[in-house]
Amino acid sequence: MTNAAGEAAGRPAILEADGIQRLLPHRPPFLFVDRVVEHERGKRLVALKSVTMGEPFFAGHFPGHPVMPGVLVLEALAQAAALLALLDLSEEKRQRVTYLMGIDAARFRRTVVPGDRLELEVSVVRNKGAVWKTRGTARVDGQVAAEAEYLAMLVELDSKP
């Protein structure tokens, strides 16, 4: 899955947009992970999101002072956490969707603006079957932008939450 074209700051991509879209049901403009650059099975994952002025939410948040909504930074972390869980499954079990069950201890430390590159680091706190508890930190240039703990459940696509 490594792709030399996916290097970012000297870090080769483990998973690019096409691979991410094979795992996640999200699609632009609601896909907030561009590439995965680190993955330790059952432990942690690091993904990247390049924030551009072309993001549709900047038109209204806020005109003349574009700021990425904090809830979308949290969503980016949740998507990275879903990738962590899905990459730990066997190939035949990856046809699942992740439903968010809760967010705890969310904190916003700095704004995210066009031109920023979010580094999304998520780690496993606990995993009991289909339920995953993760901790995520979003950074820009090494500074924490947001952090939270997530509780989510992996559900087979043909079943209801």
Image (cartoon, rainbow, N blue to C red):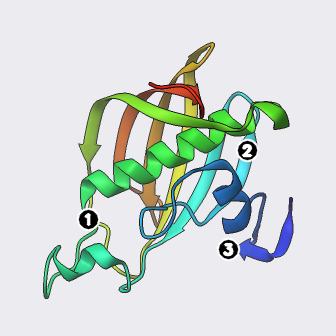
Q: Looking at this rendering, what residue extends furthest in the top direction?
A: 128
Q: How many marks?
A: 3
Marks 2 and 1, Cα distance to the nearest angstrom? Answer: 26 Å
- Front position in the image: 9 or 126: 126
Few, some or many residues within 10 Å of mark 1 (<14, 14–19, 20+): some
x 39%, y 50%: residue? 75
Which three-letter amino acid code belongs to the residue tagged 2? Answer: His
- Front position in the image: 28 or 127: 28
Quadrant location, the N terminus: bottom right
Foreground label between 3 and 2: 2
x 82%, y 34%: residue? 92
Whether residue 78 can be seen here: yes
- Contact, mark 1 vs mark 3 (Cβ under 8 Å): no
Upstream in sequence: badge 1 or badge 3: 3
- Residue 89, quarter of picture: top right
Which three-letter amino acid code belongs to the residue tagged 3? Answer: Ala
Few, some or many residues within 10 Å of mark 2 (<14, 14–19, 20+): many
Marks 3 and 2, Cα distance to the nearest angstrom? Answer: 17 Å
- Mark 1 secondary-structure assignment: loop
- Mark 3 secondary-structure assignment: loop
Marks 1 and 3, Cα distance to the nearest angstrom? Answer: 22 Å
- Mark 2 secondary-structure assignment: strand
Upstream in sequence: badge 2 or badge 1: 2
Q: Which residue is mark 1?
A: 111
Quick check: 105 above or below 113? above
- Residue 3, quarter of picture: bottom right
x 42%, y 70%: residue? 29
Quick check: 23 above or below 98? below
Quick check: 146 above or below 33? above
